[in-house]
Amino acid sequence: MIIFIKAEDISHYVEHQRKNGVKIGFVPTMGSLHEGHMSLINKSNTEHEITICSIFVNPTQFNNSNDFNTYPKNIEADIKLLEFANCDVLFLPENEEIYPAHFEKKYYDLGYLDQILEGKFRPGHFQGVCMVVERLLNIIQCDTLYLGQKDYQQCMVIQKLLSLMQSPIKLQIEPTVREKSGLAMSSRNKRLAKEEAILALEIYNTLLFIKENIKDQSLDTLKNNATATLSAKGFTVDYIEITDRFLHPVLSLDTHTQFVVLVAATINTVRLIDNMIG
Ligand code: AMP
């Protein structure tokens, strides 16, 4: 695996590959890699000649400095995992490579996506996500960008970003990889104590319960009961929401409506998100 530290170097490399007609898949991450990330690498590997992974813990998308400072880091293990998965290239930039002195911040008009769910509870988060992804895509001109459904709203935001950028890059969304228990894999799970990890399973159970009972109970009753149950177990619940596939709230469902159930809840200091589509 080739490791690039400098933006200029990886840009030249990618340009050279593209001139030779090589197709490139790109998996941006914040490191502390797990099987969820690896599923994206594997998928890209099957569909492209070259797979590039980036690891950069992006400060501009953290609205909570404690969350940024405690974000798990494990670069040596990450490199081993990427090599094991036959990732071709790792981009491992320092902050100055992504945000050089001349970098100009701009505002991304994400419409309602910036106001709801994660946008509401993490003000500025998606502006920071767009900032880093646009910068990464300018450095790495890939054919396909691979993202995980685990961050459902982020996928929609990036789709919007690609249209704002008038970019030809294809967005490929891959299913959420879960522990055997059902807990969605997440780098933040590493911050959970053993008993907290067991408790975190309640998020998955809640999603499953709502999905299985969605046709039989009113959506408000489902959401209110689920919020009360999680709160009683010690979670601080930011939201439990049922929406259509575009994240518009739904008040009732007919048998044909496709829906997404989304949860964000904190155990002690660890904030977890998950979703399920149906
Ligand atoms: P992160 O490092 O958390 O910023 O995630 C990098 C990419 O991996 C994002 O596109 C995430 O949606 C994706 N991802 C994170 N966790 C999972 C998971 N459990 N299953 C599938 N994709 C995931």
Image (cartoon, rainbow, N blue to C red):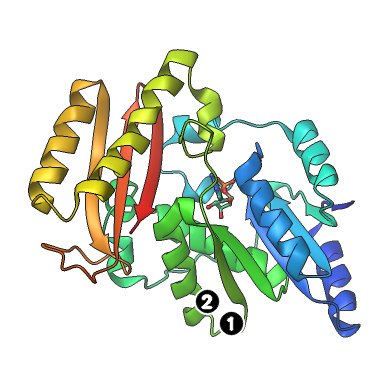
The image quadrant where one finds the C terminus is bottom left
Q: Is residue 57 above or below residue 44?
A: above
Q: Determine contact: label 1, label 2, CB under 8 Å.
A: yes
Instruction: Decide: is 77 above or below 120.
Output: above
Q: Is residue 164 left or right of residue 122?
A: right
> In the image, residue 202 lies at what x, y percent?
33, 30
Q: Position of residue 30 (x, y in %)?
A: 62, 45
Q: Is residue 187 visible?
A: yes
Q: CA distance from mark 1 to mark 2?
A: 5 Å
Graded by Cα atoms within 10 Å as few (under 14), some (14 to 19) or many (20 or more), the crowding at tag 1 reads few
The amino acid type found where label 2 is placed reads: Leu
User: Is residue 100 in view?
Assistant: no
| Residue corresponding to mark 2 | 162
State the residue at coordinates (39%, 44%): 274
Using residue 76 as the reference point, say whether residue 185 is left or right of it: left
What residue do we see at 39% from left, 42% from top? Answer: 273
Name the foreground residue: 207 vs 133: 207
Considering the numbered disc 2 on the image, is that residue within a helix, a strand or a loop?
helix
Residue at left 82%, top 51%? 5
Q: Residue at x 32, y 65 (%)?
A: 113
| Mark 1, secondary structure of its residue | loop
For residue 201, which quarter of the picture?
Answer: top left
Mark 1 or 2, nearer chain start = 2
Residue 167: image x %, image y %?
A: 58, 82
Q: Residue 257 or 70: which is nearer the viewer?
A: 257
Instruction: Respond yes or no on whether mark 1 lies under 8 Å from ligand 1.
Output: no
- Dot 2: few (<14), some (14–19), or many (≥20) neighbours within 10 Å? some
Left or right placement of residue 135 versus residue 270 in this view: right
Task: From the top left corner, tell me how far across and down residue 26 is, in percent.
Answer: 70, 63
Task: Kindly identify the amino acid type of the residue bearing the numbered disc 1.
Answer: Ser
Image quadrant of residue 236? top left
Query: Badge 1 is on which residue?
Result: 167
